Image (tube, grey):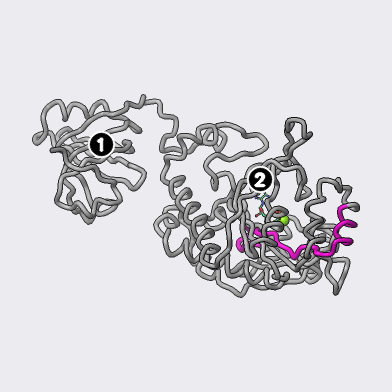
Amino acid sequence: MNPPYARIADLSAHAGQSVRVRGWVTHLRSSGKVAFIVMRDGSGTLQCVLVKSSVPADTWELFDQLTQETTIEVTGEVRTDARAAGGFELGITALELIGSSPIDYPIQPKEHGIDFLLDHRHLWLRSGRQRAIARVRHETEQAMRDFFYERDFTLVDTPILTAAIGERSGLFATEYFDEGTAYLAQTGQLYGEAAAAALGKIYCFGPTFRAEKSKTRRHLSEFWMIEPEVAFNDSNDNMNLQEEFVSYVVQRVLERKKPELDELERDTSRLETVVGPFPRIDYTDAIKILESKGSDAKWGDDLGAEDESLLVEGHDRPVFIYNYPKEAKAFYMKENPADPRTVLCDDLLAPEGYGEIIGGSQREDDYDKLLKRIHEEGLPVDAYGWYLDLRKYGTFVHSGFGLGLERTVSWICGLPHLREAIAFPRMMNRLRP
Ligand code: 4AD
Ligand code: MG
């Protein structure tokens, strides 16, 4: 009977036993009498030892056909070895070549330019660093879903093809049968608001699209956003929820993905301090701080990346900037009764210069004010009829926010650019692979 298949991560359950492991060759070396094959199977890496004198001649000879990325199946005994990565090595008794790999594998252990790596993203994903990022991203997403699940939010999946737009930034448009132009969703929020009147606390989590002609390290044209919407939360409740959410997610990743963060050489002491409360700075005060730091930001402007960096200087956790001027923000934000030049909103800025990770607001719940804002922004009123209905049939105070997944993952992992935070990034100049 053949030994059972085992995943490298599960080898501790097989110490002293014979198993079969399938995966890809990552490193090879041989002394002529003993050969070492380091392989990965997606769950971990394993050093396998092939001893010339203890295997049949054809098994030993097969070693010469191996190259980086060859797919193999090895059979052997799981041996405890404190020096080995993962704590085990495999003493090979049988070796099978499943899929060969020519020696011109493009990604080599040397410096490659970023465009070269992105052109080979389908292969680059196999590297240790990219695997670590993928795992942190997965944990981040799962933590986010668990956070809302545990708090009895209902997940509502919102459409990607839409007729009305949500944000000011660029749109991807496509023909939609006889209905005219459809736009790829920039946000699920407007639909989330409708669902909040049905279910109270909801969130949506999906891909969102912005045709922004910006080639910055913080912009993708396709990114994932998680957007909760809560009936009867005001702007202050909304910031409390963001604080609790971000702290939960960061601490959960720290707890469960320490080896991956170490692989990425992330200074995790900079994440340990990410617990509420987060400082809250009124926009008008933020402008004063910026002026004192020599920025030329003026009251009325939205804040740029440099200003965001200046504002988080000296803070060891995210910082809220709240109540921006109306003209700097989207049409749906609620006018601030205490200062109608501003709206009840917040941006949450990550520390260490990672910039805005969340945009949130209390929504305009007054029918006439919202209609006026739609006119002022030159938006087509008929496309917002259903959205206005939410203020006609039982209006309610409500708030929500959108957190950008890739920006958050970049910050947690300490990545200089968003493009590594998603498996296949979409940017202005990149649609392939
Ligand atoms: O501030 P934004 O535009 O807010 C909204 O879309 C609201 N409708 C959210 C809501 O209230 N439900 O975007 C929210 C977040 C930003 O803070 C940022 O993290 C991310 O989405 N984001 C981007 N991430 C990557 N590439 C881009 N081009 C992004 N644009 C926004
Ligand atoms: Mg924003």
Residue 203 seen: yes
Q: CA distance from mark 2 to mark 1?
A: 52 Å
Q: Residue at x 23, y 39 (%)?
A: 36
Say which quadrant the N terminus sits in: top left
Find out whether the residues at labels 2 and 1 contact each other: C-beta distance under 8 Å.
Answer: no
Query: Magenta segment range?
Result: 349-374
Count neighbours of disc 1 (C-alpha within 10 A) and say few if under 14, some if 14 to 19, many if 20 or more.
Answer: few
- For this rendering, which residue is in front, 412 or 143? 143
- State whether residue 387 is above or below residue 117: below
Residue at 87% over, 51% down: 377
Mark 2 vs ligand 1: CB under 8 Å? no
- In the image, residue 173 lies at what x, y percent? 74, 36
The front one of 325 and 178 is 178
Q: Is residue 422 left or right of residue 232?
A: left
Type of amino acid under label 2: Pro
335 lies left or right of 84: right
Q: Is residue 316 visible?
A: no
Return the residue found at the far left. 53
Instruction: Report which residue position mark 2 lands on.
Output: 159
Residue 19 appears at what percent x and percent y? 19, 43
Q: Is residue 418 above or below residue 67?
A: below
What residue is drawn where x is 75% and y is 50%?
A: 166
How far across and how far down the image is residue 146, in percent?
50, 61
- Residue sitting at x 58%, y 44%: 419
Element at label 2: loop
Identity, as a three-letter code, of the amino acid under mark 1? Arg
Q: Is residue 8 magenta?
A: no
What numbered label is drawn on residue 29? 1
Q: Quadrant of residue 153?
A: bottom right
- Magenta stretch: residue 369 in it? yes
